[in-house]
Each structure stands twice: as C-alpha cells, then as structure tokens.
Amino acid sequence: MNNDNVRLFLKFVLSSNVLSFGKFKTKAGRDSPYFFNTGKFSNGKLLTTLADFYAKKILDIINAHGLKVDCLFGPAYKGIPLVSAIAVTLCDYSLNLDIAYDRKEKKIHGEGGQIVGDINGKNVLIIDDVISAGLSSRRAIEIVRKEKGVISGILVALDRMEQGQSVASRDYKNTTEEITESMGVPVFSIVKLSDLKNHSEIDGKNLKQIDSYLKKFGSLN
C-alpha cells in the first residue's frame, strides 16, 4: 500500500478512536501503551471504509506477489464481520471470493464441525485485525491446515511488530518474520507500527512510549 493510503488509514483509525493511547493489557498479557480496537468499527459507514482498505490491500498483494486467493478466512469472532464486509467490497472490484470462519465451540448438530464454509483445497487468505505475539494467527493456521486449506497468507490491519513469547521466538525480530520463516506463511499488513513514527497526528510522548515498548517486546526494523 502506498504512503498516501497508509497516511489515510492512520488518520481513519485515529479519528474513529480505533487506535488509542493509554494503558492496556494485550492478549499475550503485555502492558501496552496503545490499543487497536476493531470493535469500534460498529456501524455501516465505518465498516464499509475499513473493508475498502482491506480490499485494496488484497488487490495490491495479489498483483505484487502473484498471490492466489479463492477464499477469505475470518477467525472468530472479530474476523467474521471482517471477511463478510471485505468479500462484499471486493465484488465492487470485480473479485468474487468465498468466505469461511470458525466457531469457538465445535457444533455437534446440523451440519456439525468447527468451520462454516468450505476451504478444502482452496487458496485461503486469513484475515485478522492485528498481529502481535501471534497467538490467534497460529491457531488460524492450524485450523485452516486441518481442514485441508492451502494458506496463501495472513492479512492484518496493524502489524504490532512484536516478538512471540516462546524461547524460539527470540531468534526472530518479530512475529511476522517468525511465522513467515518457521511456518511458511507470509504476513501482510495495511500498516505497521513503524508507520506511526511518520504520522504527524501522533505526539512525541506517545511515540516514546511505543519505542520503549518495542525495545522490550519487539523491533521497529
């Protein structure tokens, strides 16, 4: 995604209060100076705008990397409305993709199973909101591979550029590098945390806190 779209996306998430600063606890149990909350995309206009950013990024990576994508997979729960909105938006760009998502609990009646949708043999792009320590990304990879889907990659709105929590993670500068190299799954993002450093609407105090955070948990490189 070009610099103008990166700037516009950051402006969008700041004005929507999706990206906020303070004291927050991440899923990995880390004390973070910022929070990226896609739950704030809680009306049609905001979700439509978000989906368009994702759709444009998908078209970019298909064209730039020759990525094959037949299906979008959204990890429960936030990934479900994301893949639905993105798939509808992609139709406006003449790209019709399947969607699928998982259940938190395996269904034992009706059609049964953990997956809604068919990903068997399909080229699957996993859609999520952020990647940090990689907990949800690894779970999604396991689910898709168990269902015999072929993973084309992972696309998130924000790459937090953090390391994972395992001993093995210390060999990588961040989770994106680790998943790409150790699991063979490329990770793409609309923006990276490093993009905040060049955004004029974020003050110096918040940037210093982010720098300190990543010195402890990741890398801005």
Image (spheres, rainbow, N blue to C red):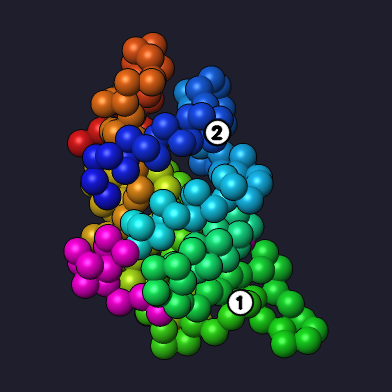
Q: Which mark is residue 16?
A: 2
The secondary element bearing badge 2 is classed as loop
Which amino acid type corresponds to the residue marked 2 in the rendered image? Ser
Is 58 situated above or below 195? Answer: below
Q: Would you identify the image quadrant in which residue 221 lies?
A: top left
Q: Residue at x 59, y 47 (%)?
A: 45
Work out whether residue 184 or residue 127 is closer to the camera in this orientation and state it. 127
Q: Is residue 70 magenta?
A: yes
Classify 10 Å Cα crowding around label 1: few (below 14), some (14-19), many (20 and above).
Answer: many
- Left-right relation of 123 to 67: right
Work out whether residue 43 or residue 22 is closer to the camera in this orientation and state it. 43
- Left-right relation of 40 to 126: right
- Left-right relation of 81 to 10: right
Is 85 situated above or below 21? Answer: below
Which amino acid type corresponds to the residue marked 1 in the rendered image? Ile
Q: Position of residue 216 (x, y in %)?
A: 34, 27
Classify 10 Å Cα crowding around label 2: few (below 14), some (14-19), many (20 and above).
Answer: some
Q: Residue at x 56, y 30 (%)?
A: 17
Q: Which residues are magenta?
A: 59-76
Q: Residue at x 55, y 22 (%)?
A: 23
Work out whether residue 170 or residue 68 is closer to the camera in this orientation and state it. 68
The secondary element bearing badge 1 is classed as strand
Q: Which residue is mark 1?
A: 115
Q: Position of residue 1 (x, y in %)?
A: 27, 50
Q: Position of residue 114 (x, y in %)?
A: 64, 76
The residue mark sitting in front, 1 or 2, is 2
Between disc 1 and disc 2, whose residue precedes? Answer: 2
Mark 1 to mark 2 CA distance (whole Å): 32 Å
